[in-house]
Amino acid sequence: MKIFADYHTHTIYSHGKGTIEDNVKAALEKGLEEIAITDHGPNHILIGIKKENFRKIRDEIYRINEKYPQIKVLMGVEANLISLEGDIDVPDELMKYLDILLLGYHTGVLPKDFYSGINLFGKNTLGCFVKALRPVIREQNTDAIIKAINKYKIDIITHPGAKVDIDTKRLAEAAGVKGTALEINSGHGYITSEYAKIAKEAGARFVIDSDAHTPARVGDFKRGINIAEKAGLLIKDIINAKEELK
Ligand SMILES: [Zn+2]
Ligand SMILES: [Zn+2]
């Protein structure tokens, strides 16, 4: 199978090492047809995209698309969950700049309010120490992501299960209904092949991404392809896969 697009890459607009153009050049070298620039959402403490940069990134991507017509460059964000109600850290007025919306569960994020902070992040930290709480926290994490899927048009859930525990089967059912792809992240190795199998049966589709934080890693799908093959996923299960030309 060939992966023709990398929909999850970071640049200096969050904590990546390369510029947008560096990532695009790397993608061209790897023979990709599409790349998305998806820096961390604005509430990511210290590293999130500054809200005033949305317009700037959009303009830069317009220019780069003109300069490199052989590849399609998309503007995206790896947004953060900021409340139990499924709120994310991209305000409505900034949505118009985006071609693609990713959502990931991250810590180190400014919550919507104090209550959300305690419940979203505090409880997950507590769960590291108090085993008995984990099943409840897992359900709560899952509910919050599902609410976000139902509230916004989210294209991809990044590395489900990587930072906090979630019920992949329940998430996969909701994602399948909404057409949201679950990411097999070549950097983190999440979701695992065991999870991918369960998620496929539950009706989800997938995307294989690099989550590159350096231009050198753009288009690095090796680990993701291994996971997908081990899980028995087919090209039709993966939104950015196609038949390899012989
Ligand atoms: Zn992430
Ligand atoms: Zn990322």
Image: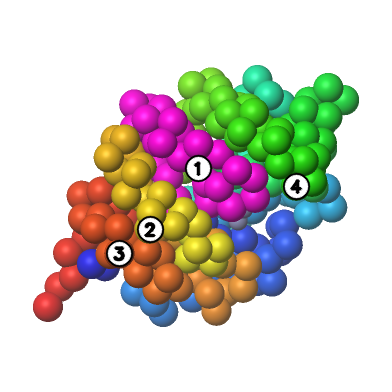
Side (left or right) of 66 relative to 32: right
Q: CA distance from mark 4 to mark 1?
A: 23 Å
Instruction: Name the residue at the right extreme.
Output: 114
Which residue is identified by label 4?
128
Asked if disc 2 is less than 8 Å from ligand 1, the answer is no
The amino acid sitting under disc 2 is Ser
Amino acid type of disc 1?
Ile
Q: Which disc is residue 193 wearing?
A: 2
Q: Which mark is residue 230?
A: 3
Whether residue 58 is situated above or below residue 86 in the rendered picture: below
Q: What is the span of residues highlighted in magenta in the rendered image?
A: 158-184
Q: Secondary structure at mark 4?
A: helix
Q: Give the labeled residue for mark 1.
A: 157
- From mark 1 to mark 3, how far is it between C-alphas? 21 Å
Q: Are marks 4 and 1 in contact (CB under 8 Å)?
A: no
Give percent across and percent down for residue 109: 78, 42
Of residues 179 and 189, which is closer to you in this image? 189
Marked residue nearer the N-terminal end (2 or 1)? 1
Q: Identify the secondary structure beneath mark 3.
A: helix
> At which x and y percent is residue 43?
77, 40
Of the residues shown, which amino acid type is indicated by label 3?
A: Lys
